[in-house]
Amino acid sequence: MGKEWVLERDWEVLEVLPAWFFKVKLKEVDTLVRCKKSWRMSQSNISIIPWDRVKLEINQYDMSQWRIIFRYNDYKTNINTAGRDTPASNHQIWTQHIKK
């Protein structure tokens, strides 16, 4: 049973802002919000880069405080998000470039 007073939604990170803030966009609606990583993600040194899919949490009593609580691991599933190159193919290109 989850927390009843918290709403969770899936988003996509658009850009990294100063002071560890992120600009994220909801998949279905063109809504942009500014959020921070949760304390647990910061302690675990989980990095977030643009185009990552994340799960956000918001408290229904204070709608201005958004937190990233989970980063989906698209690297293992090799999902091509919105026509972009997959992270696995980018990694292969990068390693080939370094080996030259």
Image (tube, grey):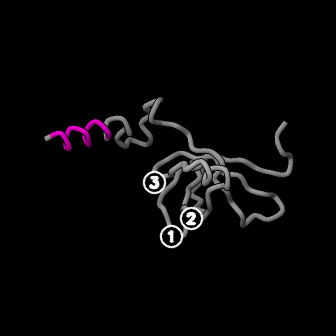
Q: Which percent across, then down, holds residue 48?
A: 50, 52
Quarter occupied by residue 58: bottom right
| Three-letter code, disc 3 | Pro
* Magenta stretch encompasses residue 15: no
Disc 1 and disc 2 in contact, CB within 8 angstroms: yes
Quadrant in the picture for the C terminus: top left
Residue identified by numbered label 2: 21
Chain part drawn in magenta = 91-99
Residue 50, labelled with which disc? 3
Which numbered disc, 1 or 3, marks the residue that appears first in the sequence? 1
Residue identified by numbered label 1: 18
Instruction: Please state which of the two labelled residues, at mark 1 or mark 3, is closer to the viewer.
Output: 1
* Magenta stretch encompasses residue 97: yes
Q: Disc 3 on helix, strand or loop? A: loop
Most extreme residue toward the top is: 77
Q: Which percent across, then down, holds residue 35?
A: 62, 62
Alpha carbons under labels 1 and 3: distance apart: 14 Å
